[in-house]
């Protein structure tokens, strides 16, 4: 109807001549993007810097299909830090030592929530903003809480908004970022939306204001870190696809989140939208297919890959709590095609005898790139790799010889397992992280059983002998680990660390004191180059990442004489937002020094965790250049700042005139670069003074002077004789 004015029109022939000029000089081509940032940056990212997508990212929350539980399905979809530099800390409740004598034990700590009343359960980060609901005493459920929901800048800790969202179901479970790329009238990504569990309530991420409600969701989505994640997938445009399965009626259907809206020149959605409509113009589904009759009716979805395949099994327990809860023999795993050309076709089916142990098939342990899915035997800590294309077992691991008996105490099985970058990472109460090749099962490296920089040894501090370590987020070639356990009794045991390792080598990149809670049930999130987590030692959220620095330089204000030396001095300070927090500002009224990467962890412990001041702290190198009075620029040396941020350099200018001094800190893994400049003058060199010529004396003067001297000598001689005569008298 919109094009009716052009229907049945006849266009007469026409022509036009266009002349082109051939030239050697290339025609101007605009840049595809401007360079990646080499200075401190914030959001919004200017729209012409398109390549900055490689250094920016979002963390959409545990119920988003962006994550497979706590793991980014695509590890390149996240950017985390390679430094332990703290940007800021923020209390989420009372934490640390209670104080006083009316406690269960001396030095008792505040309740940390641990397993069932988690305090930082599901952080969400969109557009550089952290969204989280703070606890109010004890959280009610995993979907409802009474505390304030806050939006906080991940770089500065600044509170953007704070609201008490009425319950029930008032906890945000995932962020939603959708790009209407295929719409001819609208292009680009829509501002973020925050959803509570199962799409039930939608809120504007920028303001926290309610937008609309969703009813009759056909698929209930799992949010626990111990359940399968297979019934969902995140499309390339941000669409959330949910897969509804009916074993009894033998069908699978694909639900499409973008169909909640009506699209046109302007998208629209009612205040209450029905998610279950399955026909007509408001159909929320893409397709519904029958499945082969050879699939048992009690099967469940393990994992789904958009327009590729769905993996099913009749081992009904996602976590494998004992053989009796694992389904009905014969046990099977099957692959069904979701390719549009063969959707619903059985690709393969493997039947096997259930071993006398607990075997699980976790949905989070499916590698789409290498076409591998994993099974895990809890009692033997054995991992099996299977082909996604045939179901055949390709390899299995054996319990490593150096394993502690406590490695078998991964009672939730695969919760200590993680995959990414072609590897399987296995941690747990045993305190050693094993990295296996996901294609072959070969052991590539271990962490925790070496010397300095590769140890989790706990001495007498723990019965385990080593600190438990659990793999968390994996992004930009780094795997982040935390230490925690199910129900630790405050005061918490000492020495737990947050760790960052190189995924290729297992090399330790950095550590920082921190007690992480229970096996990834507390949230770790990476985005825009920052790691955010809750440290149970003090119940503060920590933002860790590369921060801004400030360099100053001073020189004498008045001119110095030529030939004398000048002292050039200044400071290099850490100016992250955390340095202005009340405690830090009071303790460091002159600012907090920027220090070397090798000293960063010890320095952050001192600055933010009330630990003793470390000795032998090294600052950062400062390059000093001058522009002399002839306009020549040259480097005159490098100074290193100290634990107060101060540096100095003595230098003797070689010509007179005005000098401009430029002090530059090139930056490090922890700090972005900074620079400052000043000026001083050198006075002109004084010309040598000529003495007046001597006048020749006249002959008369010569005679007079000579006679005077002779008379004086005679008088002195007579005086001496008289003294001797007097002394000889009796």
Image (cartoon, rainbow, N blue to C red):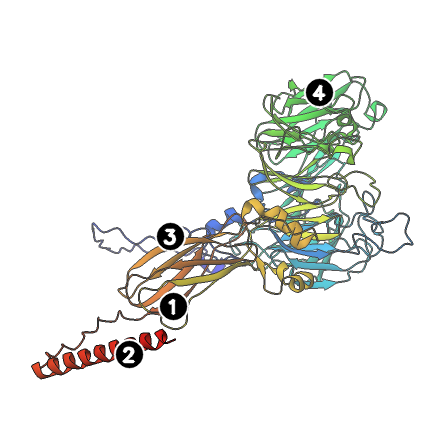
Identify residue for label 1: 679
On the image, the x and y values in percent for residue 592 come to 59, 59
Between the C-alphas of marks 4 and 3, the distance is: 54 Å
Mark 3 = which residue? Answer: 31
Frontmost of labels 3 and 1 is 1
The x, y position of residue 696, in whole percent, is: 10, 78
Q: Residue 395: image x %, image y %?
A: 64, 18
In the picture shown, does residue 48 fall above or below 599?
below
Left or right: 408 with respect to 679? right
> From this viewpoint, is residue 181 visible?
yes
Q: CA distance from mark 1 to mark 2?
A: 71 Å
Q: Residues within 10 Å of mark 4 (few under 14, many from 20)?
A: few
How much space separates mark 4 and mark 1, taking CA atoms? 67 Å
The first of marks 3 and 2 along the sequence is: 3
Q: CA distance from mark 3 to mark 2?
A: 107 Å
Left or right relative to 716: residue 487: right
Q: Residue at x 81, y 25 (%)?
A: 326
Of callouts 1 and 2, the N-terminal one: 1
Q: Nearer the viewer, mark 4 or mark 1?
A: 1
Say whether disc 4 or disc 3 marks the residue closer to the N-terminus. 3
Residue labelled with disc 2? 719
Q: From the viewer's perspective, is the residue at label 4 or at label 3 nearer?
A: 4
Which corner quadrant of the image does residue 460 belong to?
A: top right
**Disc 2 secondary structure class:** helix
Residue at numbered disc 4 = 399
């Amino acid at each position: 109807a919109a094009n009716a004015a052009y229907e049945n029109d006849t266009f007469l022939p026409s022509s036009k001549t266009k002349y082109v000029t051939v030239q050697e000089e290339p025609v101007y081509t605009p840049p595809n993007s401007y360079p990646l940032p080499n200075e401190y940056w914030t959001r919004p990212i200017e729209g012409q810097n398109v390549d900055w997508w490689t250094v920016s990212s979002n963390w959409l929350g545990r119920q988003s299909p962006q994550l497979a539980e706590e793991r980014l399905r695509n590890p390149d979809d996240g950017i985390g830090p390679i430094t332990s530099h703290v940007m800021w800390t923020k209390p989420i409740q009372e934490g640390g030592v209670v104080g006083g004598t009316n406690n269960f034990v001396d030095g008792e700590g505040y309740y940390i929530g641990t397993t069932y009343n988690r305090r930082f359960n599901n952080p969400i980060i969109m557009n550089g903003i952290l969204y989280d609901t703070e606890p109010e005493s004890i959280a009610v459920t995993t979907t409802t809480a009474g505390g304030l929901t806050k939006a906080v800048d991940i770089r500065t800790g600044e509170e953007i908004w704070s609201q008490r969202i009425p319950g029930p179901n008032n906890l945000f479970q995932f962020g939603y970022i959708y790009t209407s790329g295929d719409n001819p009238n609208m292009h680009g990504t829509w501002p973020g939306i925050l959803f509570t569990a199962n799409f039930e309530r939608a809120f504007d991420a920028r303001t926290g204001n309610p937008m609309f409600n969703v009813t009759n969701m056909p698929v209930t989505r799992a949010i626990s870190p111990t359940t399968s994640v297979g019934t969902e997938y995140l499309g390339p445009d941000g669409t959330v696809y949910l897969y509804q399965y009916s074993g009894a009626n033998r069908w699978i259907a694909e639900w499409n989140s973008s169909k909640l809206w009506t699209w046109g020149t302007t998208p629209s959605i009612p205040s209450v939208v029905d998610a279950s409509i399955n026909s007509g113009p408001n159909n929320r589904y893409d397709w519904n297919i029958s499945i082969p009759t050879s699939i048992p009716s009690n099967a469940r979805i393990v994992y789904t890959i958009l327009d590729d395949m769905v993996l099913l099994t009749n081992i009904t327990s996602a976590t494998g709590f004992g053989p009796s809860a694992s389904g009905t023999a014969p046990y099977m795993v099957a692959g069904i095609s979701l390719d549009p050309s063969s959707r619903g076709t059985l690709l393969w089916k493997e039947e096997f005898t259930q071993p006398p142990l607990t075997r699980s098939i976790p949905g989070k342990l499916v590698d789409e790139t290498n076409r591998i899915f994993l099974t895990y035997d809890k009692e033997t800590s054995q991992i099996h790799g299977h082909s996604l294309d045939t179901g055949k077992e390709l390899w299995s691991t054996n319990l490593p010889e150096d394993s502690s008996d406590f490695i078998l105490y991964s009672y939730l099985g695969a919760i200590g397992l993680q995959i990414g970058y072609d590897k399987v990472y296995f941690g747990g109460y045993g305190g050693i992280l094993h990295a296996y090749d996901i294609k072959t099962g070969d052991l590539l490296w271990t962490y925790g059983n070496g010397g300095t920089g590769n140890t989790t040894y706990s001495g007498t501090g723990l019965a385990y002998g080593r600190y438990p370590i659990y793999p968390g987020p994996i992004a930009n070639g780094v795997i982040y680990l935390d230490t925690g356990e199910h129900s630790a009794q405050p005061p918490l045991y000492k020495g737990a660390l947050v760790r960052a390792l190189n995924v290729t080598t297992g090399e330790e990149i950095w550590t920082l004191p921190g007690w992480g809670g229970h096996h990834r049930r507390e949230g770790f999130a990476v985005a825009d180059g920052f790691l955010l987590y809750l440290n149970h030692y003090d119940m503060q959220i920590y933002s860790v990442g590369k921060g801004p620095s400030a360099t100053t330089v001073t020189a004498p204000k008045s001119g110095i004489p030529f030939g004398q030396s000048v002292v050039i001095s200044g400071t290099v300070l850490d100016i992250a937002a955390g340095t202005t927090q009340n405690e830090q500002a009071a303790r460091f009224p002159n600012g907090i020094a920027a220090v070397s990467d090798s000293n960063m962890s010890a320095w952050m412990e001192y600055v933010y965790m009330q630990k003793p001041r470390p000795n032998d702290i090294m600052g950062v190198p400062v390059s000093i250049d001058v522009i002399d009075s002839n306009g020549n620029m040259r480097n005159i040396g490098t100074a290193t700042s100290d634990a107060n941020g101060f540096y100095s350099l003595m230098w003797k200018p070689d010509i007179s005139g005005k000098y401009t001094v430029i002090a530059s800190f090139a930056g490090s893994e922890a700090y972005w670069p900074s620079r400052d400049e000043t000026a001083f003058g050198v006075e002109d060199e004084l010309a040598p003074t000529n003495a007046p010529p001597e006048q020749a004396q006249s002959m008369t003067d010569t005679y007079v002077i000579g006679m005077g001297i002779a008379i004086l000598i005679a008088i002195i001689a007579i005086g001496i004789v008289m003294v001797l005569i007097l002394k000889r008298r009796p």
